[in-house]
């Protein structure tokens, strides 16, 4: 069945009363299968190989730095009295934030019946998991004696003869991030089962077929299976939606339950969540736009998808801006001397540059998305998204570093400077992230074929109904 | 199914009109409501609530509760309308007019806010204690701090801001209401496009105004207390209340035969999901606010919760956990409940009552640590009951006089909404 | 074909191209009364549940049950661990901090509910299932691509091979196919098997090594992967340090430092001497005593006291009585630090003649006497003193008995505490205290082991002990006499019984020996 009608259509324009198509061109079920599967079936492209080599080198460098850190001790970082939560925690919060878009797209947009999620949810979920991997690394190595990090688990220990401290938000964090990682992994994997079965059924090579066959768990496409599968998917979405909110909420508790000026403010939970979604979507766009170009997926990941994500960035960016404003206002309104000082210090103290980078990138740059051309021309989206990512990294920098470097007592003030290890680990974590993402692109179905086909079926049905 | 029935109906179908029995109630309700409101105020001022409570402050606080209660429903409805346009929702078109009708009460509510503005000028701090000159001295607040703070919390500046909030919100709601009604006549698609295009900036303005209105009108009742989350907290309650009100109104309209075929189980199912979702959201916001303050344990902040576990308020504070979270959470958890319009309606009525308790709990403890005894209770109930009756009567009267249809009959997305089915 | 006839027939399916034709076919099949049917599709088809008559799943209940389990585990775990089993105060929060327990309970609820949904789905679907007869037909591979299949199971009561084939054909199904058992080989390919076996084998090696190390001991020091602060740069006690001129690693107290809890009482309490009186009588000695108390570690102290000690030297030994070891001696205040003190006693017996002890000893125990103090004194006495002096204080403790048994030559018999010279009139409490603190003759001082209050308690107990050995029944309060008499009678009876038993045993032994001797003699006799 051909759908020439959607060919060359600008699906960013939607007449009220009609829904713009989300699958373009003369796509059919088998063309969707073909365009997604061939990415994993053909030999890797040169761009992929080069990208993989660069990111794998960075990832190895990350590993070497971790080994050096563990061998030598945390003194190799710039963390120094009074800033004991230096870059590792900045990176941790940054990566956890990146990890929010995936589950948000999969779960919350699913609950809101946003069909445009189907083309991007798989890659976004994968990013979630890789970002959580990167995020989990940092607190793991930040505990000092990383080899004893398992003491965080509530296991009956004959050596310690005691239990973890459940009234500490840092332990909540352990539970939140590990639960989030696990549930995201389940969600991602469950979503992939039918597509892995597609890979299995397309494999000519015996071992390849066996490998994908094991991963596909014997999926046959039975309607009964689909029925339970969809129910399980809806349930997981319903569980993951509050989970995704809880994770960054709990990360914000790490800061907000304390009494450090600039950390203790009640808006932190929703504001952190909005910021996480904001940065996560920016990262999805940063990765998906090149991927869509390289793998020729323009018919499935259409400009409309990109535009919708830009709108989400605009919305969450504005919420973040409102939260900055509210914080500043309440710091003045509350008339608590330390709190007032903390905010003035952020904007005009020794880290003024970080603050203004943050404001420019997070509040001003997304406002460019009010202009339609900025939402539809891919390279512009990438540029703005990268600014947003930079801004969100600096937001965590501002929160962690400025507040700690100016505590209550001027005698305890200091200035934080990162070392080469800090820099290497930041860059290296990106290497790890990209390595995992590139491996994923190479071996796994990067678009949820079954769901896109389902969207296409709806589109066909609608057409059929109209005529 | 519904698609077929709709096709036989024209835009002038009588089932899109306000049922006559409702229309005839308009004036009696409005009059009775106003009367109750006045009687309540008089009892409050002159009979005087029980010991330990200042009659004037108590009465004005009760008035603020009643106002906030009605206002929050309209505010939430405004948000509902804006957000449906912002995300170009299709499913909700059949109930959007109900929300619009509640939203258009905002300009009228602005008038009902005038007494609050007037009382804010009272030099003895009758309602807002910051109005009292000696507040700093009597509460041990350093003079320099107070000088800075009263630059914001002063009667003139407060009035200017309040008028700004009310005018802004009224303007947005009038704009959206007019365009939506014009579409009833013309069916122009460009109207929808226009509403969509302006929904973004409107939502931004809405967020700003709601946040600061919550700070000014409710948070400043405790002048020294502050919480950045407070605006979100009020927002969460308002949106929940608006969804409940939409369910209640829709259900009652259907009982009288209006929009009987248009709103289906599927829509109740969705509204039920939103009730559940916003109950959870409210819990999330209020728990986060409490946890952060409880954990950091800074006296400037704990005072607000401390006040609310004193005297008569303690029981109420703990009950809210169950009433506002646990019971509705468990009650709405099941899909089977959400697919039964009567049960969704019952939970919506329940949540509207609980929303009143929530507002009461936010405002009244600042008026004293006691409920104010039987007279106090009578005052509160009369004032709120009167205000709500007046609110309902006024809306009905407006709808009847202007022949407002209860369905956006020519919305381009109406067919989509009619054919809507949950997955 | 004949092959196939022997294998079990599972059912029949037909292939469809589009959702709409599939749905129509499903409805027809359902309406035709078939119940054991299924459709296979590349994506979930909306409305197929109704078309096939599939019942809703119980999955939500499974997830709910798992979620509630998670909540329960979360709450009980935290309450047990932080409130009951290992409670400790942190940031001023109560042991039972409900708000702080909510985040983890929430996370566990979600975690377990998700497990319930995911694994419940797999279990209900019977997955993983790697061998499925449906997969035998290569055309079926397109079920995950773009084709739709409608399947009717052979177990259906209405199943009739010809009828079903015709029905499916009529409904527009193509490539109608019968499903038979899968007879393909189930063997794992050899290279894969080898790889897997070697991976498993290699991964076992480190486990085995660790397991072996856990059960064997080794002389070589621990292998340090992580130093874990095992090698501290801090200096141990008594080790040399290059940091200080005196090469000592540990610093001595600043002169004049008084540690918390020391010197809280009057000087008399620490010396057993009325210091005011002593100062009037012998100022240098008093000064020396005070200095020794204040600066126990002061290296200057010996020099400072040297002069008077030497000056006093000839006089002091004169106090030292030359008496037999088992007689109580006048104790010497070992007020001087070690060097002087050790120098003193040796010349003492040679030169000294008895001179009256003029020291103004405290006559009375400064502690307020009570049963508690006496009991404390008894405990301490039985720990420190009774080993030599015996529980009864007669100088025949365990150590003494052992010394006699091994005929220790250097042993000096401990004094009995029950002699006139040691009663309080001759030997004031203060002096007794001083003896305990500083020692006498072979007995070392106990001031470093027994705290000052306990030393006074011992003094009190010794007085009570002395009194007990010289008391008559009349000294006992009336109401306790009966009890005592009974007890005495019981003890006497026991002693008598024991004596009798001993006597009998001795007799028996003697008799046996006599008999043995007689027998031996009898045996020896004939041999001669």
Image (cartoon, coloured by chain):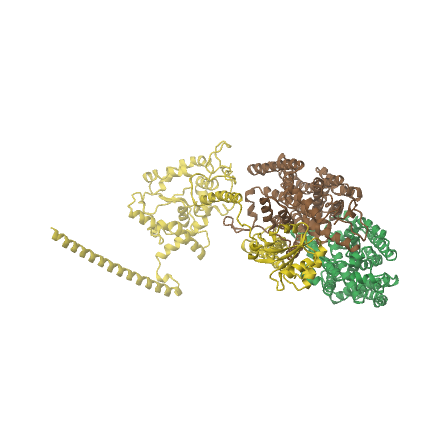
Chain colours: A brown, B green, C yellow
Q: Is residue C286 left or right of residue A333?
A: left
- State the residue in front, C330 or A79: A79
Whether residue B139 is visible here, answered yes or no, is: no
| Relative image position of residue B176 (x, y in whole percent) | 84, 54
Image spot of residue B332 (x, y percent): 69, 61
Split into 4 quadrants, where in the image is the N terminus of chain C?
bottom right
Q: Decide: is A65 above or below C417.
A: above
Which residue is at the front of the view, C279 or B214?
B214
Asked whether, in this view, residue C210 is left or right of residue A4, the answer is left
Q: Residue furthest front?
A: C2
* Count of numbered tags: 0
* Left or right of A415 on screen, residue A303: right
Q: As rendered, which of B55 and A279 lies closer to the eye?
A: A279
Left or right of B272? Residue C120 is: left
Query: What residue appears at the point 35 percent right and 65 percent down from the top-left corner?
Result: C486
Q: Quadrant of residue B400?
A: bottom right
Residue B172 in view (yes/no): yes
Residue C336: x and y in percent read 42, 39
Q: Position of residue C292 (x, y in %)?
A: 45, 40
The vertical placement of C274 against A428, above or below, is below
Seen in the picture, residue B41 relative to C253 is either above or below; the reply is below
């Amino acid at each position: 069945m051909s759908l020439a009608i959607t060919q060359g259509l600008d699906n960013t324009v939607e007449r009220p009363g009609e829904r713009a198509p989300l699958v373009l061109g003369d796509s059919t079920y088998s063309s969707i299968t073909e365009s997604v599967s061939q990415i994993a079936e053909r030999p890797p492209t040169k761009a992929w190989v080069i990208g993989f080599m660069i990111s794998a080198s960075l990832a190895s460098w990350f590993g070497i730095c971790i080994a050096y850190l563990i061998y030598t001790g945390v003194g190799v970082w710039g963390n120094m009295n009074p800033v004991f939560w230096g870059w590792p925690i900045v990176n941790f919060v940054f990566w956890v934030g990146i990890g929010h878009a995936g589950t948000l797209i999969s779960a919350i947009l699913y609950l809101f019946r946003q069909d445009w999620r189907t083309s991007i949810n798989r890659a976004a979920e994968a990013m979630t998991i890789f970002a959580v991997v990167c995020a989990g690394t940092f607190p793991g190595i930040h505990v000092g004696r990383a080899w004893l990090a398992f003491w965080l688990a509530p296991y009956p220990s004959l050596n310690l003869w005691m239990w973890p401290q459940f009234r500490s938000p840092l332990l909540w964090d352990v539970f939140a991030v590990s639960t989030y990682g696990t549930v995201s992994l389940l969600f991602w994997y469950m979503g992939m089962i039918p597509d892995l079965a597609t890979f299995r059924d397309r494999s000519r090579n015996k071992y390849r077929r066996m490998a994908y066959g094991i991963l596909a768990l014997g999926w046959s496409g039975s309607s009964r299976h689909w029925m339970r599968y969809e129910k399980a998917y809806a349930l997981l979405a319903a569980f993951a939606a509050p989970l995704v909110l809880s994770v960054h909420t709990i990360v914000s508790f790490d800061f907000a339950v304390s009494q450090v000026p600039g950390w203790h403010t009640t808006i932190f939970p929703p504001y952190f969540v909005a910021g996480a979604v904001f940065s996560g979507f920016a990262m999805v766009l940063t990765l998906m736009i090149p991927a869509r170009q390289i793998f020729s997926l323009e018919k499935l990941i259409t400009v409309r998808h990109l535009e919708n994500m830009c709108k989400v960035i605009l919305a969450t960016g504005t919420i973040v801006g409102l939260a900055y404003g509210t914080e500043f206002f309440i710091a003045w309104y509350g008339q608590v001397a330390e709190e007032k000082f903390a905010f003035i210090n952020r904007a005009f103290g020794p880290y003024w540059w970080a603050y203004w980078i943050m404001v420019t990138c997070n509040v001003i740059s997304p406002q460019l998305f009010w202009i339609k051309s900025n939402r539809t021309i891919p390279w512009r989206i990438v540029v703005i998204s990268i600014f947003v990512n930079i801004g969100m990294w600096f937001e965590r920098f501002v929160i962690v570093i400025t507040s700690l470097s100016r505590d209550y007592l001027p005698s305890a003030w200091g200035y934080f400077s990162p070392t080469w290890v800090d820099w290497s680990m930041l860059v290296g974590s990106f290497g790890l992230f990209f390595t995992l993402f590139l491996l994923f692109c190479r071996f796994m179905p990067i678009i949820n074929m079954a769901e896109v086909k389902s969207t296409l079926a709806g589109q066909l049905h609608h057409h059929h109904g109209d005529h | 199914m519904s698609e077929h029935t709709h096709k036989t109906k024209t835009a002038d179908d009588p089932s899109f009109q306000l049922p006559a029995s409702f229309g005839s109630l308009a004036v009696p309700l409005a009059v009775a409501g106003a009367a109750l409101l006045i009687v309540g105020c008089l009892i409050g001022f002159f009979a005087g609530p029980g010991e330990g409570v200042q009659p004037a402050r108590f009465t004005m606080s009760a008035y603020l509760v009643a106002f906030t209660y009605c206002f929050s429903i309209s505010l939430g409805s405004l948000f509902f309308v804006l957000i449906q346009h912002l995300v170009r929702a299709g499913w909700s078109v059949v109930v959007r007019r109900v929300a619009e009708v509640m939203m258009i009460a905002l300009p009228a509510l602005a008038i009902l806010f005038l007494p609050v503005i007037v009382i804010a000028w009272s030099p003895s701090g009758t309602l807002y204690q910051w109005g009292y000159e000696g507040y700093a001295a009597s509460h041990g607040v350093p003079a320099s701090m107070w000088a800075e703070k009263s630059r914001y919390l002063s009667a003139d500046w407060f009035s200017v801001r309040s008028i700004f909030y009310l005018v802004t919100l009224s303007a947005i709601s009038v704009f959206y209401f007019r365009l939506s009604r014009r579409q009833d006549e013309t069916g122009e698609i460009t109207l929808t496009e226009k509403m969509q295009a302006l929904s973004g900036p409107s939502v931004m303005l809405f967020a700003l105004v709601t946040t600061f209105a919550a700070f000014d009108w409710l948070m400043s009742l405790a002048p020294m207390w502050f919480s950045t989350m407070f605006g979100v907290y009020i927002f969460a309650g308002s949106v929940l209340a608006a969804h409940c009100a939409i369910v209640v109104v829709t259900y009652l309209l259907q009982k009288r035969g209006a929009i009987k075929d248009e709103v289906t189980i599927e829509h109740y199912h969705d509204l039920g999901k939103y009730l559940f979702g916003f109950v959870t959201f409210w819990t999330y916001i209020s728990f986060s606010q409490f946890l952060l303050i409880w954990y950091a344990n800074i006296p400037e902040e704990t005072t607000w919760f401390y006040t609310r576990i004193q005297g008569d308020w303690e029981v109420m504070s703990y009950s809210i956990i169950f009433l506002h979270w646990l019971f509705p959470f468990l009650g709405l958890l099941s899909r089977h409940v959400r697919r039964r319009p009567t049960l969704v309606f019952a939970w919506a009525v329940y949540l509207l009552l609980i929303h009143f308790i929530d507002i009461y709990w936010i405002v009244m403890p600042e008026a004293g640590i006691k409920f104010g005894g039987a007279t106090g209770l009578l005052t509160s109930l009369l004032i709120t009951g009167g205000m709500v009756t007046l609110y309902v009567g006024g809306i009905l009267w407006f709808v009847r006089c202007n022949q407002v249809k209860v369905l956006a009959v020519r919305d381009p997305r109406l067919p989509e909404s009619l054919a809507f089915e949950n997955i | 074909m004949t092959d196939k006839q022997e294998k079990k027939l599972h059912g029949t399916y037909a292939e469809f191209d589009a959702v709409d034709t599939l749905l129509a076919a499903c409805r027809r099949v359902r309406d035709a009364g078939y119940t054991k049917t299924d459709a296979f599709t590349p994506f979930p088809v909306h409305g197929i549940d109704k078309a096939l008559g599939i019942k809703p799943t119980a999955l939500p209940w499974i997830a709910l049950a798992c979620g509630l389990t998670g909540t329960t585990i979360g709450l009980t775990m935290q309450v047990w661990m932080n409130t009951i089993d290992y409670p400790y105060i942190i940031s001023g929060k109560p042991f039972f901090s409900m708000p702080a327990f909510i985040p983890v309970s929430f996370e566990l609820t979600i975690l377990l509910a998700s497990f319930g949904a995911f694994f419940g789905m797999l279990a209900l679907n019977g997955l993983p299932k790697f061998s499925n007869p449906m997969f035998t037909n290569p055309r079926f591979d397109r079920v995950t691509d773009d084709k739709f299949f409608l399947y009717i199971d052979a177990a259906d009561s209405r199943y009739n091979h010809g009828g079903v084939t015709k029905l499916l054909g009529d409904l527009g199904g193509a490539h109608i196919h019968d499903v038979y058992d899968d007879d393909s080989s189930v063997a794992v390919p050899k290279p894969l098997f080898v790889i897997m076996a070697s991976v498993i084998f290699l991964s076992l090696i480190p486990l085995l090594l660790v397991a072996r190390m856990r059960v064997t001991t080794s002389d070589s020091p621990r292998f340090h992967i992580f130093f874990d602060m095992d090698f501290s740069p801090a200096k141990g006690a008594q080790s040399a340090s290059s940091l200080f001129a005196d090469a000592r690693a540990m610093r001595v107290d600043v002169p004049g430092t008084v540690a918390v809890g020391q010197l809280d009482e009057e000087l008399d309490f620490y010396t057993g001497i009325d210091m005011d009186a002593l100062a009037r009588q012998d100022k240098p000695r008093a000064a020396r005593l005070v200095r020794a108390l204040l600066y126990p570690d002061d290296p200057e102290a010996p020099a400072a006291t040297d002069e008077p000690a030497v000056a006093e030297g000839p006089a002091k030994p004169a106090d030292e009585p030359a008496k037999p070891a088992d007689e109580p001696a006048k104790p010497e205040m070992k007020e001087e630090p070690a060097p002087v003190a050790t120098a003193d006693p040796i010349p003492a017996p040679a030169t000294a003649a008895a001179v009256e002890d003029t020291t103004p000893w405290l006559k009375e125990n400064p502690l307020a006497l009570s049963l508690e103090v006496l009991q404390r004194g008894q405990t301490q006495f039985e720990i420190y003193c009774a080993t030599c002096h015996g529980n009864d204080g007669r100088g025949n403790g365990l150590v003494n008995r052992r010394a006699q048994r091994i005929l220790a030559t250097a042993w000096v018999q401990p004094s009995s505490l029950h002699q006139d010279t040691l009663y309080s009139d001759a030997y004031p409490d203060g002096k007794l205290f001083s003896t305990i603190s500083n020692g006498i003759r072979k007995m070392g001082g106990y001031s470093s082991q027994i705290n000052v209050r306990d030393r006074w308690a011992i003094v009190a107990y010794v007085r009570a002990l002395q009194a007990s050995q010289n008391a008559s029944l009349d000294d006992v309060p009336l109401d306790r006499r009966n009890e005592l008499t009974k007890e005495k009678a019981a003890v006497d009876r026991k002693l008598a019984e024991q004596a009798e038993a001993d006597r009998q045993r001795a007799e028996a032994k003697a008799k046996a020996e006599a008999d043995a001797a007689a027998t031996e003699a009898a045996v020896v006799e004939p041999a001669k």
